[in-house]
Amino acid sequence: MEQKTGIFLVTSGEHPTLPLSEAKAILDAYKVDYRVGETHYKLVELEAPASAADLVAKRAGYVEEAGIEIFHSLPEPAEIKKTMRSLDLTRYISPQESFSIRVARYGGISKEVSRVKLEAELGGVMLSQIAARVDLENPIRRFRGMLAGPYFHFGLQTFKRPRGSVGRRRPRKRPAFHPSTMVPKLARCLVNLACATEETVFLDPFCGVGGILLEASLLGCPVLGVDALRRMVRGARRNLVHFGTLPFGMILADARRIPITKVGAIATDPPYGTGASTLKATTKEILRDFLPEAREILETNHRAVVVSPLGTGVSALAEDSGFKVLEDHRVYVHRSLTREILVLSKR
């Protein structure tokens, strides 16, 4: 069994609760032993096997980078350098390897500390111990200093999300577009909150043009998409194929009568209003009829993630259908729409 160590995650900071919940769900899905440490705005600290840092960062929608924590200290430069000098840095870098040190400030704290000056001073401490060389453009080892909360945190970065990797999947960049399609980060987060893995048959029963399906498919899940409108089913398939993936199956059907026997994870954002996409039913009526169906086909002790407009009463409907509500998140979209995201478990 891999020994636990300190790891850090740097989130996008776009939501106060979803990034940590997403990271925990990924670790739970892969049965990783972990303990949550402190969180300071974008920075999340965990005790977990070192490999967990990259596992979470590569799958999560809201994690931008990750790495191994080396030390933390009080945020005064003298104390930081003293702590760093006391460590054996050869555990993290070999002679002749190139390195960079970048310092970030999260939450607007420790403004009296010059990040540029601190980077140079810590580089000097590193060079005094190891015959390495500085390379700010393309180093072999990237060290990160983070001023967050009451501490300075220092670690070795093991993963950073490539620039533009999410933007290329924006709804407007896809062959089939629909204005209600969810943005990639949130869609991926929903898949992870459902604890979906490569071994999980994943279902979106209101798939639309496939925004959530696409993220699940890119994560390696065999995906099933259901929608009541033929143009949506065709659009979802086009979008998946465009990004180099194929669905396990696409079904033209009413999600209130799902023609599927068993799945391992569900995440969905049912249509709002009373238009053609809802077959003239209200969102509350759709959820009332859909949730018992979802519970019937979901494997025991597995998760469903359901999105609805705040005020729909989805929590009570879910409990009436036999689900246990594990988490409830709110995402503000605009003045007339706040999304409620429920993480449900089949008991």
Image (cartoon, grey):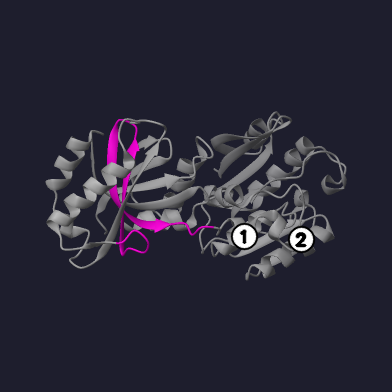
Can you give x and y, in whole percent of width and height, for residue 160 in the image? 42, 56
Residue segment shown in magenta = 135-163
Q: Nearer the viewer, residue 257 or 273?
A: 273
Residue count near mark 1 (Cα–Cα under 10 Å), binned few <14, some 14–19, many ≥20: few
Which quadrant of the view contains residue 152? top left
Decide whether residue 160 is among the magenta residues: yes
Which dot marks residue 189? none
Q: Could you tell me which quadrant the C terminus lies in?
A: top right
Residue for point 48% across, 43% down: 19
Name the residue rendered at 64%, 47% in the picture: 295
With 113 as the anchor, is 346 left or right in this view?
right
> Which class describes the residues within 10 Å of circle 2: few (<14), some (14-19), or many (20+)?
many
Q: In which quadrant is the N terminus drawn? A: bottom left
Q: Main secondary structure of the magenta part?
A: strand
Query: Percent position (x, y) of residue 323?
Result: 60, 39
Q: Can you identify the residue that label 2 sits on?
A: 176
Q: Residue at x 76, y 44 (%)?
A: 271
Label 1 sits on residue: 168
From the top left corner, tell me how far across and down residue 98 is, in percent: 27, 64
186 up-or-down from 337: above or below: below
Asked if residue 347 lies left or right of residue 123, the reply is right
Queried whether the magenta region covers residue 15, the answer comes back as no
Mark 1: amino acid:
Arg
Q: What residue sits 33% from the left and 37% below the top? A: 147
Q: Helix, strand or loop at disc 2?
A: loop
* Amino acid marked by disc 2: Ala
